[in-house]
Image (cartoon, rainbow, N blue to C red):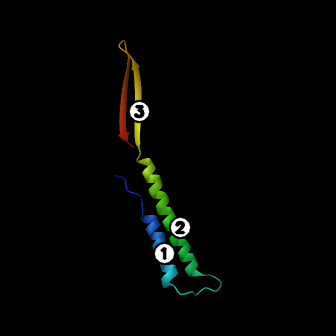
């Protein structure tokens, strides 16, 4: 089973949580809590897209070949997980 690379989204979520909950608003005109929430939302979206793309790449593929023999048509199917 292939696992999604979750290091990036986890790191982004941690940075976002630190900005949202642990850093006091010290910059005038910049809402660090909002930036933290945006980072956490981006991390969730990144993780979701990674899971969707990873699930699509693990789909089952079927190859079919037909051979015309004297008795009729011989069909051979090969199924494998990608």
Q: Quadrant of residue 30?
A: bottom right
Among all residues in the image, which is located at the extreme top? 70
Q: Which residue is mark 1?
A: 15
Expressed as whole percent of the image width and height from the top left, the position of residue 4 reads: 41, 57
Q: Which residue is mark 3?
A: 63
Q: Secondary structure at mark 2?
A: helix
Q: CA distance from mark 1 to mark 2?
A: 11 Å
Cα distance between the residues tagged 3 and 2: 38 Å
Say which of marks 3 and 2 sits in front. 3
In this picture, is 72 found above or below 20? above
**Which label belongs to residue 42?**
2
Mark with earlier residue (3, 2): 2
Q: Is residue 7 above or below residue 29?
A: above
Q: Earlier in the sequence, mark 1 or mark 3?
A: 1
Image quadrant in which the C terminus is located: top left
- Circle 1 packing at 10 Å, graded few (<14), some (14-19), many (20+), is some
The secondary element bearing badge 3 is classed as strand
Local packing at callout 2 (Cα closer than 10 Å; few below 14, some 14-19, many 20+) is some
Q: Residue at x 48, y 84 (%)?
A: 22
Identity of the residue drawn at 52% across and 80% down: 20
């Amino acid at each position: 089973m292939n696992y999604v690379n979750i290091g990036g989204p986890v790191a982004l979520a941690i940075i976002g949580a630190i900005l949202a909950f642990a850093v006091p608003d010290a910059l005038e005109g910049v809402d660090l809590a909002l930036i933290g929430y945006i980072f956490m939302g981006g991390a969730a979206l990144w993780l979701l897209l990674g899971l969707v793309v990873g699930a699509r790449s693990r789909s089952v593929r079927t190859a079919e070949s037909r051979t015309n023999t004297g008795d009729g048509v011989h069909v051979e199917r090969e199924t494998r997980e990608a």
